[in-house]
Image (cartoon, grey):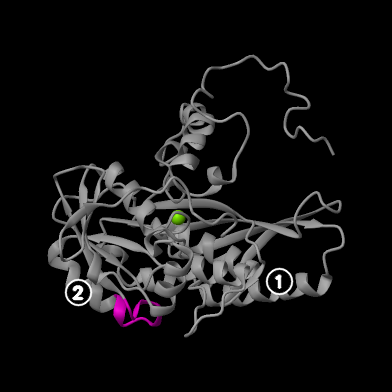
Amino acid sequence: MSTDRGTQTFQSAPPSGRLEGLPHTVSLKQGGGGRAMRALIEKLFVRDFAALPFDGVGVGAMDDGAAIRIGEEWLVITTDSHVIHPIVFPGGDIGKLSICGTVNDLAMMGATRVLGLTCSVILEEGFALESLEAIQRSMLAACIEANAPVITGDTKVMGRGEVDGVVINTCGIGLTRTLVRDNALRAGDRILVTGSIGEHGLAVMATRHGIEIDGELVSDVAPLNSLIETIVADVTAMKDPTRGGVASALHEMASKSNVGIVLDERAIPVLPPVRSVGELLGIDPLHVANEGKALIGVRAELAESVLARLRAHPLGRRAAIIGTCVAERPGSIILDTGFGRRLLAEPEGEPLPRIC
Ligand code: MG
């Protein structure tokens, strides 16, 4: 394998100028779901692809997926590659994650009814078939839970050291009459979270570092489509706080919607083990990936009713109203600590690489 990866055949490509401000080679933080990743995607992919003729919600929207109008309904499409390390973690594994991640991105756009999923697997020579079978079983269980069939796929094998064990890409398609975007918050809307935050990222991190803690810390990975189905008609905007966590997702929603968001820090549900591992590692749970949570904007008069429906579902028992959209400071997240207010910084990238 070449040591100067990616440069072998493109040495003489003419400079386009659009790499200005970016580093010369790819860094891990550019996969982290924060500002660094967005800069890479916007400069390298979105600008040109978004200029191609397309009638619908496309790559330029940088939403959880794309949407194409089909008669009275919207066909929603999304794709996600899973490179998590380690591949087994408390509460799940790469198989469960690869189904839930895609089902949830569809649900965030209102497509709670999944038509089908694709599954593309890249394996390293020497990977244990027993592990692969365990991964397939997890995928199947998640498919059954989400009522989402895998309908086509692809398998490739690379040599030892050319890929780390297993990488899984899934793509999902769904149909919805109610298309939900991440850019439609309005001043006065309330912000809800469907449960306690930070569990996925900190459970993976605790496993990776062999940290022993009091209390159980497991990933929240779960398919959210049946939960979202109960409230989707009353939502103004929605996003799942995966890489970069709640802080990154809310910044994206606020800036796309041109509103500020005042967050009530004391209302944000955080479990004790998440708080202690976060403190131990110096990582704010607001900056950490979730894999079974949604951030939901609703009109103020619907907030209590939406909250009650969320809490009636097993995956929404700890749902809470955590903030309010304001016309002031568009794009900013203002954290109300109870003692004062401060701006919540947008993370440069998820503090933990290969988290999903
Ligand atoms: Mg998403």
Q: Is residue 149 above or below residue 157?
A: below
Relative placement, left or right, of 218 versus 253 is: right
- The image shows residue 351 at horizontal and vertical percentages of 49, 54
Point out the quarter of the image occupied by ligand 1. Answer: bottom left
Q: Residue at x 37, y 61 (%)?
A: 286
Quadrant for the N terminus in the image: top right
Left or right: 285 in relation to 211? left
Q: Is residue 66 magenta?
A: no
| Residue in the foreground of this view, choosing between 281 and 4 | 281
Q: Residues within 10 Å of mark 1 (few under 14, many from 20)?
A: some
Q: Which residue is situated farthest in the bottom direction here? A: 215
Q: Nearer the viewer, residue 14 or 206?
A: 206
Between marks 1 and 2, how big is the CA–CA gap?
A: 38 Å
Q: Position of residue 293 (x, y in %)?
A: 40, 67
* Nearer to the camera, 178 or 155: 155
* Amino acid type at mark 1: Gln
Above or below 303: residue 16: above
User: Which mark is drawn over residue 76?
Assistant: none
User: Within the image, what quadrant is residue 14 found in?
Assistant: top right
Mark 1 = which residue? 136
Residue under label 2: 305
Q: Magenta part of the protein: which range? A: 310-318
Along the polypeptide, which appears first: circle 1 or circle 2?
1
Image coordinates of residue 75 in percent, x first then y, are 46, 51
Amino acid beneath label 2: Ser
- Specify the quadrant that holds the C terminus: bottom right
Residue plotted at (50% across, 68% down): 202
Label 2, secondary structure: give it. helix
Residue 350 appears left or right of 300? right
Which residue is rendered at x = 19% and y = 74% of the image? 305
Say if 156 sits above or below 92 in the image: above
